[in-house]
Image (cartoon, rainbow, N blue to C red):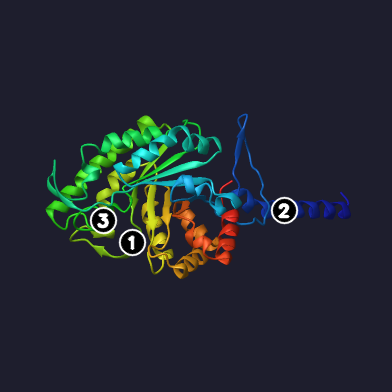
Amino acid sequence: MKRSNFVSILTVVLIAGALVALLAPVAARSSPVAAQGTLTTIYLPLAQTPSVPKLLFGMGSEASDARDSRLVHEAPVRMLTSWYNGPNDLSWITPWKSTLVLQSYAAGYALHLIVYSGEAEAPLATAYGTACGRPYPLSARFLDDIGQLADTFAGARDGPVLYVTLFTEFQTYACADNAWNPNPQTNAYYRALKDRYRAALALFHQHAPNAKVSLGWGGWQARWDSPATGGGRSMFQYFADVMRESDFQSVQAMATDTNAGDVRAMVRTLGAYSPVMLAHYKPDNGSQTVFEQDLRAMLTDAYLAEVTAAGLFAWSFMDDRNLSASESIYQFAKSAVSRYARP
């Protein structure tokens, strides 16, 4: 073989070897696809654009008002949130079955029902002894009422989802807040409440095939720890069983100072069990300053990439009052929702 031909062949071999070495790391990062018994490697481009975090966005505080919200009309908000605050709401909410609920599912909206109990605490008899807390969730009629709600909001199994946040802010329902066992009466109440949660979850699954159910945490719970009473961060372990049985997790964010840190901490904790919904967001005192600071801190690529990686899948605005109070923050929110909304 002539020396010139040998050099040419050697050059080709060296170039081919360099190309294989260059592509090998990419192949290691790619997803092999099996087709007809043969393993095929798909090579991806060397430079990849980071994906934009995506969320399901919702609006409250009742679906009847939320569907007329400006943000719902002008941005891809695809979930309508409603509150059930007790038996007096049944008279106006159950007729929605053949009107608003039917229309919303037909239009492709997911629905979100928040069940809240806000009445005064009182002594109660339970299977765990005398308890102290809000009576309605443990009352004789509660499960019958839940059955009516499940029937009202039921949709097709393969249609838009009904998300249910049961007992939102439940850490405040007992006579002593935010701890599992500060006294026997509080402990008895929470044990009985867990039983009611399981029964209500089963009713939603029975009557509403499209339902996914969660327990609703107040967003402040991770700010401190009190192992002796099962308070603060130590409270989560005592509800781990029902959280594992849930379809997703819920947390609210309504602090009047800042909410970004609370949401981050709670999503990290609850996301260990299943995906997390920010079920209702709004500063409790209506502060426009806190609202705008929160949105500008949380509706960013970096923040949402972090919390969606930890499990956040949905965000519902409690209402549109703060959005309506400022055109600049409305436009910011509209742009953010348009960027981050799930397709």
Q: Is residue 291 above or below residue 183?
A: below
Q: Secondary structure at mark 3?
A: helix
Earlier along the polypeptide chain: callout 3 or callout 1?
A: 3
**Quadrant in the rendering for residue 209:** top left
Question: For the residue carrying disc 1, how many other residues have a C-alpha within 10 Å: few (<14), some (14-19), or many (20+)?
Answer: many
Which numbered disc covers residue 278? none
Residue 234, quarter of picture:
bottom left
Q: Residue at x 48, y 54 (%)?
A: 309
**What residue is pinned by disc 1?**
220
Q: Position of residue 182 (x, y in %)?
A: 16, 58
Earlier-in-chain disc, 1 versus 2: 2
Residue at 47% x, 45% y: name it. Answer: 64
Residue holding disc 2 = 19
Please name whichever residue, 242 or 11, is drawn nearer the observer in this view of the structure: 242
What secondary structure is marked by label 1?
Answer: loop
**Mark 2 surroundings within 10 Å by alpha-carbon count, few (fewer than 14), some (14 through 19), many (20 or more):** few
Seen as rendered, the residue at the extreme left is 129
Q: In 3D space, how far apart are the residues under numbered discs 3 and 2 (Cα atoms)? A: 63 Å
189 lies above or below 158: below
**Residue under label 3:** 172
Select label 1 or label 2 by which is in front: 1
The kind of residue on which mark 3 rests is Thr
| 134 to the left or right of 86 | left
Which residue is at the front of the view, 195 or 288?
288
| Left/right of residue 115 with respect to residue 128 in the rendered view | right
Circle 3 or circle 2, nearest the eye: 3
Real-space CA distance between mark 1 and mark 2, rounded to the nearest whole angstrom: 54 Å
